[in-house]
Image: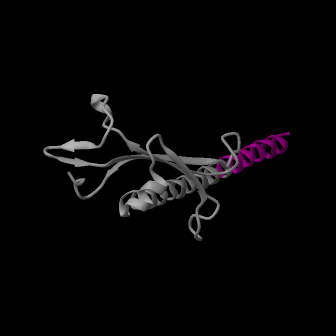
Amino acid sequence: MTAIFVIVVLAALGAYLVTVGSTQQTATALQIQGVRAYFAALSAREWAAYEATASQASHDAICAPGGFTSSFALPGPGLKGFQAQVDCDDFANAPAGRSGPYQEGDDWYDLERIDVRAWSGSGPSDPDYVSRTLHSMVTTGQPLPP
């Protein structure tokens, strides 16, 4: 009777350890995927910031008044499997409710709002789904011509 009790207790303990180990391994894998999602969003944000500030032609292609959305798969071995969505809006001087560029001192600057979401997986119901969102404001480096 004692031997059966010991076997049952050891089996239950073994099953518990396997469950804890599996849960810990899954949590670690999702943490790594979360970091990869952050870097995917960061990469997409850097691309959008470059496109918004590199030239007027690339700016108009990615940031138009009223907003513009780009969606694409991220390349490369480190970000393979991640999708990104970039929302860029040619920001109008909202604090005063006026339209137009942003004024700092006597100079005027073009101001862009860039929102980026990167994800992997088919959606929130997918147990392997991870997503990260970044919000940024960028401006032209030089003041706008008078």
User: Residue 34: in sight, yes or no?
Assistant: yes
Q: Is residue 108 left or right of residue 123?
A: left
Q: Residue at the location (31% across, 40% down)?
A: 100
Image location (x, y in percent) of residue 119: 59, 51
Magenta extent: 1-21
Residue sitting nearer the eye, 61 or 75: 61
Q: Is residue 73 left or right of residue 66?
A: right
Residue 44 position (above or below residue 66): below
3 magenta-colored = yes
Tell me the residue at 47%/40% (across/down).
66
At 48% from the left and 56% from the top, the residue drawn is 61
Question: Is most of the magenta stretch helix, strand or loop?
Answer: helix
Q: Is residue 127 magenta?
A: no
Q: Quadrant of residue 143?
A: bottom left
Quarter of the figure with residue 25: bottom right
The residue under the point 29% across, 55% down is 140
Q: Is residue 58 left or right of residue 32?
A: left
Q: Quadrant of residue 56?
A: bottom left
Numbered disc total: 0
Residue 120 rendering spot, x and y as whole percentages: 63, 53
Relative to the observer, which residue lies in front, 60 or 13? 60
Examine the rendered structure and indicate whether residue 51 appears above or below residue 119: below
Q: Residue furthest top?
A: 97
